[in-house]
Image (cartoon, rainbow, N blue to C red):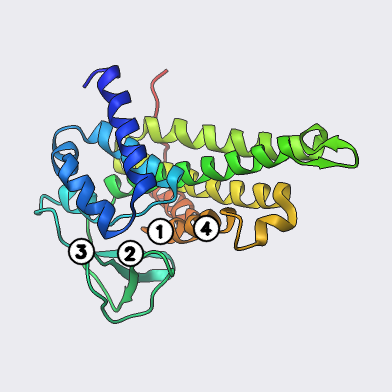
Amino acid sequence: MDAAERELLTETLRKTMKAASGPALEATLTELGWPELLTDFPEVAIPAVFGLLGETGAHAPLLNDVVLHAAGRPLGGAPKLPYAGGSWVVWERVGTGSGTVLDGELPLRTVLSGDPVPLAAGHRALGWWLLGTGRAMLTLARTHALDRVQFGRPLASFQAVRHRLAETLVALEGAEATLVAAEDPFGSLLAKAAAGQAALTAARHCQQVLGGIGFTAEHPLHRHVRRALVLDGLLGSSRELTREAGALLRAEGSAPRLVHL
């Protein structure tokens, strides 16, 4: 897939996700060839699709397909997925099952237990989703800072505001670099942890920049903040994955080379 084809795919996906979400989005993406993209071009499909889910705020149970494909199982099911705190969840495709719903927008329900599944591809997919969510929050905060006038000056002229936006951008850029370099399970674990931490950093700083308006139901920031909090816990939170990475390094007695410069 060349650069022109990737750009066309990205624009098509962006328009689709702005127009639909949930089951309707899943059906449309299936018609557009999501299963074939995942099978034939995962290195293109996963960053593009999940990054745009974060950017647009849409959602669909595509993580199920990523995990099932990595496990060599048919797409279309709903495997049990580990969640922060040692719990398990199911991302439902249709209907309503039993269990607590973690988020009013996402059909994630708690279940009692589950079987181990390959997590590396899922970690990368969620990392791109968290990265897209973080960038969406940064865009909202940056636009507010440029448009808002405080004490007779643009909000963006205040150094404290600039520092928060700059720290957010640095965190997101670092997480993206980690995701691009992730190829094995350990690198994917670190990438998801970095993306989760970057999204939480974006949520904290962008909320401060937006001030009171960021707490209102009318402003879209709260939806992205909630999405970041839920996705960070899925397949292990950034804090848990960081501890897991540390335990692996202690057990091995050395740190692997993740990027060859």
Distance from the alpha carbon under mark 4 to that under mark 1: 21 Å
Q: Is residue 135 left or right of residue 190?
A: right
Q: Callout 1: few (<14), some (14-19), or many (20+) C-alpha neighbours within 10 Å?
A: many
Amino acid of disc 4: Arg
Q: Which residue is under mark 2?
A: 82
Coordinates of residue 173 in the picture (x, y in percent): 53, 32
Label 1 vs 2, first from the N-terminus: 2
Asked whether disc 3 touches disc 1, contact meaning CB atoms under 8 Å apart, the reply is no
Comparing labels 3 and 1, the label whose residue is closer to the camera: 3
Which amino acid, by three-letter code, is at mark 2? Pro
Q: Residues within 10 Å of mark 4 (few under 14, many from 20)?
A: some
Kindly report which numbered mark, 4 or 1, lies closer to the viewer in this rendering: 4
Q: Nearer the viewer, residue 171 or 133?
A: 133
Q: CA distance from mark 3 to mark 4?
A: 24 Å
The residue that mark 3 highlights is 78
Q: Residue at x 46, y 56 (%)?
A: 232
**Mark 4 lies on residue:** 223
User: Which image quadrant is residue 95 in?
Assistant: bottom left
Q: Which amino acid lies under the numbered mark 1 shown in the image of this protein?
A: Gly
* Residue 169 in sight: yes
Q: CA distance from mark 3 to mark 2?
A: 13 Å
Quarter of the image with the C terminus is top left
Q: Along the horizontal axis of the image, is 190 left or right of 185?
A: right
Q: Which mark is residue 236?
A: 1
Q: Nearer the viewer, mark 3 or mark 2?
A: 3
